[in-house]
Image (cartoon, coloured by chain):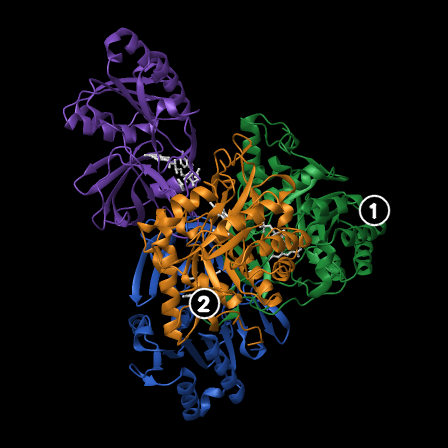
Chain colours: A blue, B purple, C orange, D green
Amino acid sequence: MSRLFEASVKDNRRLAENHYLLTFHPLKKIRRPEPGNFFMLSTGNGLDPLLKRPFSIHRRTGSDIRILYRVAGRGTDILSRKRPGDVLQIIGPLGNSFPVGRSRKNIILVAGGVGIAPVFALAEGLIASLKKPVLFYGAKTGSGLLCIEELNSIGIETHICTDSGDTGRKGPVTAILREFIQGNPSVSEDCCIYACGPEPMLRSLSALAAEYGLRGYAALEQNMACGIGACLGCIVNTTGGYKRVCREGPVFPMNEILW
Amino acid sequence: MSRLFEASVKDNRRLAENHYLLTFHPLKKIRRPEPGNFFMLSTGNGLDPLLKRPFSIHRRTGSDIRILYRVAGRGTDILSRKRPGDVLQIIGPLGNSFPVGRSRKNIILVAGGVGIAPVFALAEGLIASLKKPVLFYGAKTGSGLLCIEELNSIGIETHICTDSGDTGRKGPVTAILREFIQGNPSVSEDCCIYACGPEPMLRSLSALAAEYGLRGYAALEQNMACGIGACLGCIVNTTGGYKRVCREGPVFPMNEILW
Amino acid sequence: MKLSVNLGKLKLGNPVIAASGTFGYGEEYSEFIDIGRLGAVTVKGLSLRPKDGNPPPRIVETPAGMLNAVGLQNIGIDSFIKNKLPFLRRFRTRVIVNFFGDSISEYAEAAVRLSSAKGIHALEMNISCPNKQAGWSIFGTDPRVTFRVVSAVRRATGMPLIVKLSPNVTDIALMAKAAEDAGADAVSLINTLTAMAIDINTQRPKLANVTGGLSGPAIRPVAVRMVWECHKKVNIPVIGMGGIMSAEDAIEFMLAGATAVAVGTANFVNPRAALDILEGIKSFMSARGIRSPGELTGAVKLDVA
Amino acid sequence: MKLSVNLGKLKLGNPVIAASGTFGYGEEYSEFIDIGRLGAVTVKGLSLRPKDGNPPPRIVETPAGMLNAVGLQNIGIDSFIKNKLPFLRRFRTRVIVNFFGDSISEYAEAAVRLSSAKGIHALEMNISCPNKQAGWSIFGTDPRVTFRVVSAVRRATGMPLIVKLSPNVTDIALMAKAAEDAGADAVSLINTLTAMAIDINTQRPKLANVTGGLSGPAIRPVAVRMVWECHKKVNIPVIGMGGIMSAEDAIEFMLAGATAVAVGTANFVNPRAALDILEGIKSFMSARGIRSPGELTGAVKLDVA
Ligand SMILES: Cc1cc2nc3c(=O)[nH]c(=O)nc-3n(C[C@H](O)[C@H](O)[C@H](O)COP(=O)(O)OP(=O)(O)OC[C@H]3O[C@@H](n4cnc5c(N)ncnc54)[C@H](O)[C@@H]3O)c2cc1C
Ligand SMILES: Cc1cc2nc3c(=O)[nH]c(=O)nc-3n(C[C@H](O)[C@H](O)[C@H](O)COP(=O)(O)OP(=O)(O)OC[C@H]3O[C@@H](n4cnc5c(N)ncnc54)[C@H](O)[C@@H]3O)c2cc1C
Ligand SMILES: Cc1cc2nc3c(=O)[nH]c(=O)nc-3n(C[C@H](O)[C@H](O)[C@H](O)COP(=O)(O)O)c2cc1C
Ligand SMILES: Cc1cc2nc3c(=O)[nH]c(=O)nc-3n(C[C@H](O)[C@H](O)[C@H](O)COP(=O)(O)O)c2cc1C
Ligand code: FES
Ligand code: FES
C-alpha cells in the first residue's frame, strides 16, 4: 500500500471564519491513519504553490478522510476553494501517532484552536475503546471553537475557555487546566496529557506538566518540504538533539522538547 | 470603462479533442469587442502560470463573451478545468480589429484549425450587415473542424478541407482557395481576404494573395506578456519595421508582413 | 503619515516606482491607473540612436517568471524627448530615464543629452542588461570598469544618478560600492538574471537571442538577499526590485534595505499592480503606526528572537 | 535503445540521478520507488565529523521554489559507512557520496576515508554550499581556490570525482574549467542560489540562518543557461540540475549540454519524481528514435531556423 495516492474531494465546507472541513476520498486503498498521523496535500495546479502542505487526520468515516484546517496563507486559501470532484495528490499517512498503548486512568486532552483537529481524532478513538478522557479546549474567541457539536456527540467531558471570555471561561487553557489539577489531586496518579495547539500554549503546558510531574505528549508543527524524513527541514530541538517532526514526530514527549 | 475586469465562468465545454468553448460573464460593463480583438485571461491561482494568455473574441451573446480555444500547454490546460462560477482576471478588449469599414463585393474568409475563433466573429458580423462572405476552412482532420453547426446556422457559404481528407476536400486550404479563384476570375475584383490560422498557412496564403494581386489581412499570434504594448515582447517584422502584435495588430495587411 | 522618500538629490512623493522596460513610456498604463500617483516612472532604456532590438520570439514564460530578450529596442533619446516626454510632463510623478551606451563615451554623451531636457528628474544607467553581445557585459560585472563608466557619466551630468546593477556577479555589494565611489546617488537592483530555455520539440532555444533575462517572482528571494547585502555595504540609497507582486513583497525589500521599490513584471500580470502596491504599503504603515517609509528601510531584525 | 551514460570513469545505467540533500540516504524513498532503477543516488553531504546543522526554521517556500538552510546537518562519514551504506549496497544503482570540509586538508582527508569504503562509486565535492559562514564560500567562487582544493582531493583519491559548482558567480564556465584543470572527472551544477526571505509581520528573516539556498523550478532557466555555458567550455561531462520537475525539463538540460541530470526539490513534491522522469525520457527517446542519451547532450540547435 503506497503512501502516495490521489484522492477526490467529496466535501469542503466552511465551519467558521477561516476554518474549513475537507473530506476526501482516496482513489486507492491506503494505510489506516492513526491519531497524530498527518498527510501532505497538494494545493495548486501549477508550480506555485510548489510544496505540499501537512494536515493532521481529523476523522475517518469509512474510507473517507477528513481534515480540519485554518486558512493560514496561500496554500490553505487555495485549498479552501476546492470543490467536490477536484483531485488532490497526497502523501500519507505520515509520522508517528499519540502513544496510547498502555492504559492510563486519567487522560487529559488539551487543544488550542485548530489544534483540535488531531486531538478530536484521538478523543474519538479513546472513547471508542471505552476510555474517559477529559478535554480542555481553548481559542481566542467562541468562533474559533470548532466542532463543538461533534464533541458533544461523542460525549466527551469538555472544558471550554476563550481569551475573550465570550464563550466558556475566560483565560488561557493552561490556567483552566491548572485549576482542574489543583481541584482534583488524584489526576496526577497515572495521568497522561495529549496536546496540540499553538507553540506558546504547548510551551506553558509543558511547564505546567513539569511542575506537577505529569507525563505528556505534544503534536508539533514545523515547516515541511518532504514530509518523509529526507530534507531535514522540519527539525525540533530535543534533549536527544535535533529530531525531524515528520519522522520522529509530530508527537513528542513534552519533557524532551527544548522550547 | 476600464479594460481590466473580472468575469465569472458561465460555461466551459469540450467541443472536440483538446478544444473548448468558454463563456464568461464580465462582472462589470466592458467595451464592446470587435472581431479581431483579443482578451488576456488569467489561468492559474498562484504565481505559476504567471502571465495572462491571449484569446480572440469568438462570439458575443448579450453581455457574455465566448472564446474558443485549443489546449496548447499548461495555461490552456488549467483553463479547460475551470467550472461555472470560477472567476477570471481579464484585460481587454485589446488590439485592432479586421478592417471591414469599406464595403467590398467579394469577401473571402480563411481559417485554419482554431483560427476559426476570430474568423467566425467576423463572419457573424458581416452576415449581420448583409454581406455575403465565403469561408474556406481547413484542419488536420475532421475532428479539428470546430463550430460547423454554428457556421451552418449563420448560413455562410463554407468550403471545408482537411489534410487527412476524412472530411471535406483533401488538401491545404490554400489549394482549395486557389482553385476557387481560378474558377471565379471575377472574385479578384474588389476582393479582400481575412484570415487566421497557423503561420505556415498564413504564409502560403500571403503568397497566393500576392500572386493574384488580392488584398488581405491576417490575424497573427506571438508570445505576449502585457498585451497592451508595454513590454515590446510580441513583435512581428513588417515592411515598416518591427511592430507589436498586441498594439499595431493582431491584424496586419498580409503584404506588409515579412515572414 | 509621510510617504515621501529621498534618493540622494531626488525626492519622490512615495516609494513606488515603475521599473524600466516594463512600463513602456508611461502612456500604455495611463488608461489603467493615474500614473501621476506613482513615486516615479522609469522609462524603457534609451540610447543615442534608436535600436531595433532582437528578432522574435522575445519572451517566454518560465515557472513563476519570464525570460525576455527584447534587446534594448528603443526609439532613441531624441525621439523620446520630442514625442514621449511631453506626455509624462503632464503628471506629478518623477520621471527617471533609463539609458545605456555601447562605450564609455556613448554613456557620457547620452547623459549630457538627457540632462538638458525638461521634465527628466533622474537618470538610471543600465550597466547590467544581459542581452547585449560579447564584452559589453563587463560594464556591469567588473567593478573597475563599473567605476570608470559611472565616473564618466558622473562628470557629464549634475542630475541625480542611479546605477542599475546586474545580479549576475559573485559579489553584488562590491559593484554597489564601485558605483558609490564613482559618485552615484543611488543604486537600483536587481536587473534580470541571465537565463535560457530550450524547446525540446524543436531543439531550439525558446528565445531567438538564445539567452534572455529572468524576471518575476521566481527571482525575488535572490533580489532580497542582494538588496540586503548592498544596503549593508553602501551609504547611498538602494532601490529594490525583482519579482515584487504585492505590497508584502515591497515591504520585504524595504526591510532588507530598500529606500524605494520598483515594480516590473507585475505590471504585465496586473496593470494596476504598482498602484495596488502603493495602497497596500499605506495600509500596512497606518495599521502599524509607521510614520515614514524610512522606518522600514533596513529594519529587518537579525538578533536572535 | 541504450540508456547508459559515462561520467568519465563512472558508468551509470541511465542518466537520472537523485540530487544530494534531497534524497536522504536513499532509504526514505525506497518505499515509494525501486531506487535500484535510478542511474545514481547522491547522498546528503557528509563531513568527517557529524554536524548538527542550523536551528529551525530551515525551509520556506518561495514562488515556484524553496529556500533551505539545513546547514549541512549530517551523521558524519564513519556513521554513514557503518549505518547507511549497507542498505544502499543492496541496489544496482550507483552511489555518489557528496562531501565537504572546512579546509583543504579536511576535504582531502574525507576523500581518503570515503575511498576505502565498499559500495561507493563516485565522490561529489560540494564546494558551493552557501550556508556556511564567512570566508568558506571562496572554495566555490574563486577559481584559483577551486583549483587548489580540487587538486588536493584529486591527489587523495583515485575514485571518479565530480565537482559541484556554485551558481553564485559571475562566470560559472571559469569555475568548471578550474575543476577540469585540477583533474575532476565531471562537474555538476547548479547548487542553490543564495537568497533570503523576510516575514513582514515579525520583521525577521524567515530562516533562522538569515540566508538560504533557492532551489526548485524557479531557478531552472538560470541552471540551463549555466549548463550550456559550462558544456561549451569544458571537455568533461556535465551533470545538470536545478528545478527539474519533469522529463521535459530533464531533456532541456541534456540539450543544453548535460550528460546526466539530477532531480532535487522535485522529490519532495512527488516522491516518485526521479523514476517518472526516467520513464518520460525513455518514452521521448523511443518516440524520436533516439538510440542513446548522448545524442541529446548539447544537441540544442543554434543556427537560424
Ligand atoms: C504535522 C502537521 C500537522 C498539521 N495539521 C494541521 C491541521 O490539521 N490543520 C491545520 O489547519 N493546520 C495544520 N498544520 C499547519 C498547516 O500545515 C499550515 O497551516 C499550512 O501548511 C499553511 O500553509 P499556507 O500555504 O496556507 O501558509 P503559508 O504561510 O503561505 O505557507 C508557506 C509555507 O510555510 C509552511 N507553513 C506555514 N505555516 C506552517 C505550519 N504551522 N506548519 C507547517 N508548515 C507551515 C507551508 O507548509 C508552506 O510551505 C499542520 C502542520 C504540521 C507540520
Ligand atoms: C492575439 C492572439 C489571439 C489568440 N487567440 C486564440 C484563440 O482564440 N484560441 C486559441 O486557442 N488560441 C489563441 N491564441 C493562442 C493562445 O494564446 C496560446 O495557445 C496560449 O497562450 C497557449 O498557452 P498555454 O499556457 O496553454 O501554452 P504554453 O506553451 O504552456 O504557454 C507558454 C507561454 O507561451 C505563450 N504562447 C504559447 N503559444 C502561443 C501562441 N500561439 N500565441 C501566443 N502566445 C503563446 C503563452 O501565452 C505562455 O506565455 C491567440 C494568441 C494571440 C497572440
Ligand atoms: C520586458 C522587460 C524589459 C526590460 N527592459 C529593461 C531596460 O530597458 N532597462 C533596464 O535597466 N531594465 C530592464 N528590465 C529589467 C526590469 O527593469 C527589472 O530590473 C527586472 O525585470 C526585475 O524586476 P521584476 O522581476 O519586477 O520584473 C526589463 C525587464 C523586462 C521584463
Ligand atoms: C533541502 C536541500 C538540501 C541540500 N543539500 C545539499 C548537500 O548536502 N550537498 C549539495 O551538494 N547540494 C545540496 N543541495 C542542492 C541540491 O543537490 C541541488 O543542487 C539544488 O537543490 C538544485 O536542484 P533542484 O532545484 O532540483 O533542487 C540541497 C538542496 C536542498 C533543497
Ligand atoms: S519535512 Fe523533510 S525531513 Fe521532515
Ligand atoms: S505583449 Fe507586451 S508589447 Fe505586446
Question: How many residues crowd around disc 2 within 10 Å: few (fewer than 14), some, or many (20 or more)?
Answer: many
Evaluate if marks 1 and 2 touch, with contact meaning CB atoms under 8 Å apart. no
Q: Is residue C263 above or below residue B174?
A: below
Disc 2 residue type (three-letter) = Val
Across and down, in percent, residue B65 comes to 23, 40
Q: Residue at x 37, y 40 (%)?
A: B76
Give how far apart the Cα atoms at labels 1 and 2 are: 60 Å
* Residue B244 visible in the shown view: yes
Report the side of B132 relative to D265 (left or right): left
Q: Nearer the viewer, residue C35 or B131?
A: C35
Residue B206 drawn at (x, y percent): 37, 19
Residue C252's tag is: none
Q: Which residue position holds label 2?
A: C5
B184 or D63, which lies in front? Answer: B184
- The chain identifier of the residue carrying mark 1 reads D
For label 2, the SS is strand
In the rendered image, residues at marks 1 and 2 fall on the same chain:
no
- D30 lies above or below B101: below
User: Where in the image, quadrant-wise, is ligand 2 located?
Assistant: top left
Residue indicated by mark 1 = D158
Residue B230 visible in the snapshot: no
B9 to the left or right of A255: left
Q: Image quarter for residue A119?
A: bottom left
Q: Amino acid at mark 1?
A: Gly
